[in-house]
Image (cartoon, helix red, strand yellow):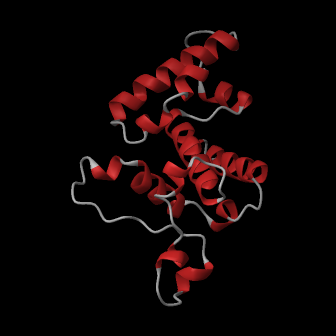
């Protein structure tokens, strides 16, 4: 499992067919840990283990990295590219009180939108304020995983 999570930043904008392949590997790992029939549905087992599905797992890693960048816990070469919308505006706007991130303008949507500052900022801005306003990293992890888990397995 750790090897699958190792390079999630490169997996941020995979095609749906490639994400299905990755999810099938995760499902096989779940069946290895949780003894069951091959024909049983995998969703209840994933729920029992509180494992996120592959798109949500990638989003989790990306959001944690953005949180670390915003709070000075990430390397400087990543933190320099992430900036709050309130800090980038010259005049006071409504966004100055929110936790939104300024999204850089790109020229090539096929390549540039996959870059960490752009993809991470778009993901961060799509999260609810209850998640992004967490005061500490451990609270952020809990709120984010709960949000992504409920999005993945809508109850």
- Figure check: 28 above or below 86: above
The residue shown at (49%, 90%) is: 91
Q: Quadrant of residue 106?
A: bottom left
- Figure check: 46 above or below 94: above
Please state which of residues 89 and 22 is positioned toward the viewer in this rendering.
89
Q: Quadrant of the N terminus?
A: top right
Q: Where residue 37 sits in the image (x, y, percent)? A: 62, 9
The residue shown at (49%, 30%) is: 7
Asked if residue 55 lies left or right of residue 32, the reply is: left
Q: Residue furthest bottom?
A: 91
- Figure check: 130 above or below 153: below
Q: Where residue 10 sits in the image (x, y, percent)? A: 41, 35
Residue 36 in view, yes or no: no
Residue 32 in view, yes or no: yes
Asked if residue 83 lies left or right of residue 48, the reply is: left
Q: Where residue 77 sits in the image (x, y, percent)? A: 49, 49
Q: Residue furthest front?
A: 76
Q: Quadrant of residue 133?
A: bottom right
The residue shown at (24%, 48%) is: 110
Asked if residue 67 lies left or right of residue 109, the reply is: right
Q: Where residue 26 sits in the image (x, y, percent)? A: 55, 22
Please state which of residues 154 and 127 is positioned toward the viewer in this rendering.
127
């Amino acid at each position: 499992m750790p090897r699958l999570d190792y390079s999630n930043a490169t997996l941020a904008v995979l095609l749906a067919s490639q994400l299905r392949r990755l999810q099938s590997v995760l499902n096989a790992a779940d069946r290895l840990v949780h003894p069951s029939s091959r024909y049983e549905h995998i969703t209840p087992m994933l729920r029992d283990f509180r494992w996120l599905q592959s798109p949500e797992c990638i989003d989790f890693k990306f959001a944690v990295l953005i949180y670390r960048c915003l709070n000075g816990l990430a390397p400087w070469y990543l933190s320099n590219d992430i900036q709050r919308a309130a800090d980038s505006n010259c005049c006071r706007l409504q966004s100055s009180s929110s936790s939104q991130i300024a999204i850089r303008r790109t020229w090539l949507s096929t390549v540039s939108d996959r870059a960490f500052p752009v993809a991470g900022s778009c993901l961060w801005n799509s999260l609810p304020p209850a998640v992004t306003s967490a005061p500490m990293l451990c609270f952020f992890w809990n709120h984010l995983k709960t949000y992504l888990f409920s999005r993945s397995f809508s109850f």
